[in-house]
Amino acid sequence: MRDVLQDHIERGRIPGAVAMVAIGGQTEFFAALGKQDPQSGTAMQPDSIFRIYSMTKPIVSLAALMLVEQGRLQVVDPVAKYLPVFAGQKVAVQEGGKLQLVPVRREATVQDLLRHTAGFSYEFLGDGPVQMQYREVDIAARDRSNAEFCAVLARIPLAHQPGSCWHYSRATDVLGALLEVVSGQPLGVLLQETIFGPLGMKDTGFAVPPSQQSRMAEPFAQDPDTGKDVVMMDGRVVPRFESGGGGLLSSAADYARFLQLMRNRGTLDGARLVSRKTVEWMTADHLGSIPGDGDMLIPGHGFGLGFAVRTHAGLAPQAGSVGTYFWTGIGGTSFFVDPAEDLFAMLLTQAPGQRIFFRNLFRQLVYGALD
């Protein structure tokens, strides 16, 4: 694994990476390779800090289910119960070559947010009328509060009827705003008090403090395949928008604490954050016969409450076990947890354009190393 990753680094495919594999709760492989910052030449460090983007989603989903356990929230609750701006939403449909807005057949629920069946989309998932409107309002802007983000998003029609299909989306951003209403706290404060603090995740947050900014991993200035400038979120600036779907930065050691908690089914170092049954519920398939839209969900997989979940031993273009759950980040980070093998693994790099190749390669390398 080390040799293969190092070879790709030397050929200029990625600037550097931190990779780890744990089996039976014990770290069996850990490597910091290449450059943390290819511009300055700084070597990658074991504690380098990465923009983890959508690897934020499982953490925020866990926070939501902790509130469910406390009786403060139910997944059957309509989103509009907490965020009234989403009441009475319309769905954009093409009829006779014209865009029509039709009422939702039912309101989106908290469960829909958790499993991406709420009807939202992402601005980078095509050029349909909904995605175009997302881009027109710069829905990713980090200078809006979470509540202000929802006010802008709610004025745009849905891409799908709630519950009709799985469509990867900004649903977890909406969930983050909803958690602020339920808890009465900013999302970052809620995560710090309920997850980061108890787990000792001292390097995880929506921005990197000045004293730690020298540890930030950076991408190549230009993509090695396209030659285009690589633009990633500025983790040095404290955003108003605390994106529950993609705003966190973290280190390998920190995220491993979260994965160890999940591997242990809710407990770590003698402290229980969430029940065993809640972890089992989170990591079960919640789609059933609900179809997927697009190619973000690979064959042989469903989706749980914050994770993709493997449902078939075959079909997928990579080895694995039924019950494996995982997710990735658009910046080049990925993880998976395989309960059948009692294994979890993580690859952190900052290479947006090469992310799909390397998350597949890493999975192949991990499973190819097993006895």
Image: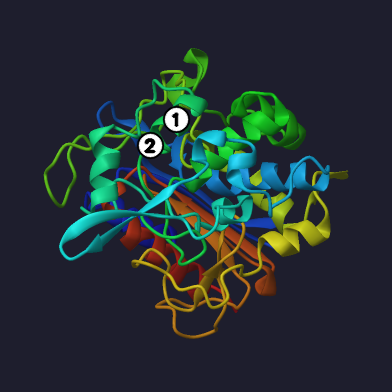
Q: Give the CA distance from mark 2 to mark 1.
A: 7 Å
Write down the quadrant of residue 331 in the picture: top left
Q: Residue furthest top?
A: 210
Q: Residues within 10 Å of mark 1 (few under 14, many from 20)?
A: some
Task: Please rate how many residues cluster around mark 2, counting C-alpha atoms within 10 Å: few if below 14, some from 14 to 19, many from 20.
Answer: few
Q: Position of residue 75 (x, y in %)?
A: 69, 52
In the image, 347 versus 294, the foreground residue is 294
Query: Which of the 4 image quarters holds residue 265?
Result: bottom right
Outermost residue to the left: 227
The residue carrying mark 1 is 151
Identify the secondary structure beneath mark 2. loop
Q: Residue at x 41, y 71 (%)?
A: 298
Estimate the x, y position of residue 230 in percent, counting from the top left: 22, 38
**Viewer-closest of 270 and 369:** 270
Which residue is at 80% across, 48% downward?
274
- Asked if residue 340 shows in the view, the reply is yes
Quadrant in which the N terminus is drawn: bottom left
Q: Amino acid at mark 2?
A: Arg
User: Residue 104's mark?
Assistant: none
Residue under numbered circle 2:
155
Q: Position of residue 158 (x, y in %)?
A: 39, 51
Q: Is residue 151 above or below residue 72?
A: above
- Residue sticking out furthest to the bottom: 314
Q: Amino acid at mark 1?
A: Ala
Q: Is residue 45 left or right of residue 76?
A: left
Q: Residue furthest toward the right?
A: 270
**93 or 241: nearer the viewer:** 93
Q: Is residue 357 left or right of residue 51?
A: left
Do tag 2 and tag 1 residues touch (Cβ < 8 Å)?
A: yes
